[in-house]
Image: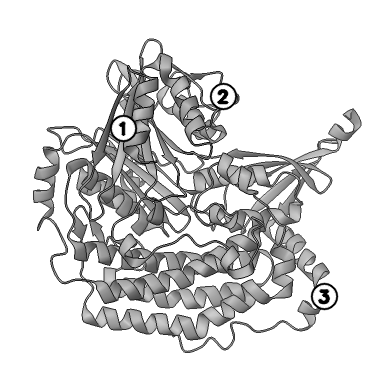
Amino acid sequence: MENRVEYWVKIPIGPIHPALEEPEKFIITLDGERIVNVDVKLGYNLRGVEWIGMRRNYIQILYLAERMCGICSFSHNYTYSRAVEEMAGIEVPERAEYIRVIVGELERIHSHLLNLGVVGHAIGYDTVLHLGWLARERVMDLLEAIGGNRVNYSMNTIGGVRRDIEEKHKRAILEMIKYYREKVMPKIEEIFLYDPTVEARLRDAGVIPKRIAIEYSAQGPTARGSGVEKDVRYNEQLGVYPDLGIKPVTPKEFTGVIKGDVFDRMVVRVGELWQSMELIERALDQMPEGKIKAFPKDNVTLVRLKKAEGEGVGRYEAPRGELIHYVMANPGSEIPERWKMREPTFPNLFAVARALVGEQLADVPVAIASIDPCLSCTDRVAVIDAKTGKKKVLTEKDLLKASIEKTREINPNIKAKPEPVGGSCGGVR
Amino acid sequence: MTPEEFLEIILTKFPNVEGEIRENKLPHPRKRVWINVERENFKDLMKLIKEIDPKAQFSIIIARDGGDYLEAKYHLELFYEQTPSISLIVGTKCPKDDPKLPTVTDVFPSALPYEREVQEFLGLFFEGIPDPRKLFLPEDFPEGVYPLRKDEKGISSGMVKNAGHPYKMKKEG
């Protein structure tokens, strides 16, 4: 046993990655190709948001919350507003709830398309990345038309939304859904459900069994890919979602089996793209006329919140999983006593770290990318030989090369005939 | 199981516990169970919750500096396969001169990263925690400084320069 220990190699992956929304470091202990242990270290980009939040008022925190993540900016905003609304007992107009559903689902489409592309990139299928990013432009343009910005669109305010969805936006949304249904989804389904190379590469990689997903409380598509049927929109009876007929999506409806691997997580994302489009259509159909804000101006809201006491919890299913915000009032002050939030990536990271034990090093990029913290663009990896103490630096290129080589090994034809899947996806720009 | 039934089970087993159900005013009213428990009974209560629903999901620890005490609130979700599920918040307190709570990592293994976070940010320590290393803060962060505390052990103004204002920081070099 002592001899074996000498051959163990520790490789730190991280902490800086261009595609990460929060830099993190994975210290991976290897025995040959097999992973023996994974340790996670966080906090390389700790911005002290909670500390800053205890010095700002309720309205200012809205914009701070939104900037925590570039991709789920609406989700943070919405969850925080819900927490404050629950704390102060503010009633939200029904039309505002429908607009929140529409913007939230548009954001889910945008986030899932990004992640599907990133996973394609991690296995060397760059056409998938370009297909995803090209298709994503359309929904980002639409979000710009509705909210005024491509990211951080500040749609939410406490007690409603800031901008209305007008008739021209409605037409544009329906047009976009038609485009996705006809042009994008068939290609994405072809790649992620029926392509033999993708299946061989993603099946049995980064398996999270149902037991571990429950034990480590995995969230979102990571949990649903393992067969845990939970979805905050459904469990919590969130907003107007129950009126739209929400149900958790599991891979069973598409492939008939649940294995809890990367493939299943991708299948859940494909299913959720279909679901989001359906939800948007129904929401547009059922949306009533009326007010979009409980209070006309922000200072009115602040006066009301100054008198509030108690505490509130907001929960929402962000594209990556359950998001929680907690707000405690400080009566007589416009600054909350305590504001605390939890991102879905936090438990998911520990679940995937546990699941990586026993897997191969070549599966690390794709397994970590599949929970959507985008670690696939692994920047620099220093390999330290525990025996001699020598250091060798692997770049992003080397790690991707190892991953692409594994794909080639499984299917040698792919090099000779790279199917241009995104080629005919024109007509977007 | 409805929230009312769940609260009744808790209150019969632990008569000293304060528990209530609050409802919000959103389009679909949502009930949440809020429980406050003494430090002595806290661990047993968590074990009882795990017995009631073995699949209960541990979501978050919200810890806070309340002046002369430190407070920790645990959000849990029970029966998430039925709808609506039970959203439960268990709160417990400890005095500031004895900032210790029992760990729940043996009942809910996913609580470990949250407990490590509370330890380094608020100086609220968990007895019997299997991995007490720092998670977010760097290893060379000064000992005995807890950023989210409001007393003299928190961050002093000398340690913070223009927090949240990168423009000003740049200007001063």
Hey, what amino acid is under mark 3? Answer: Pro
Q: Position of residue B23 (x, y in %)?
A: 24, 42
Q: Up-down: is A340 above or below A274?
A: above
Q: Categorize mark 1 by other alpha carbons within 10 Å: few (<14), some (14-19), many (20+).
A: some
Q: In this orientation, which residue lies closer to the viewer: A88 or B31? A: B31
Q: Helix, strand or loop at disc 3?
A: loop
Q: Which mark is residue B34?
A: 1
Q: Which mark is residue A341?
A: none
Image quarter of residue A237: bottom left
Image quarter of residue A199: bottom right
Q: Helix, strand or loop at disc 1?
A: strand
Q: Of callouts 1 and 2, which one flags the residue occurring earlier in the amino acid sequence?
A: 1
Q: Which residue is mark 2?
A: B132
Hey, what amino acid is under mark 1? Answer: Trp
Q: Quadrant of the C terminus of chain B?
A: top left
CA distance separating discs 3 and 1? 59 Å
Q: Position of residue A57 (x, y in %)?
A: 20, 42
Which chain does the numbered disc 2 sit on? B
Discs 2, 3: same chain: no
Q: Helix, strand or loop at disc 2?
A: loop
Figure label count: 3
Q: Is residue B99 left or right of residue A349?
A: left
Q: In this orientation, which residue lies closer to the viewer: A415 or A229? A: A229
Hey, what amino acid is under mark 2? Answer: Pro
Which chain does the numbered disc 3 sit on? A
Q: Which residue is mark 3?
A: A412
Q: Residue at x 23, y 36 (%)?
A: A336
CA distance separating discs 1 and 2? 29 Å
Image quarter of residue B90: top left
Q: Residue at x 60, y 53 (%)?
A: A226
Q: Up-down: is B86 above or below A363?
A: above
Q: Position of residue A184 (x, y in %)?
A: 52, 81
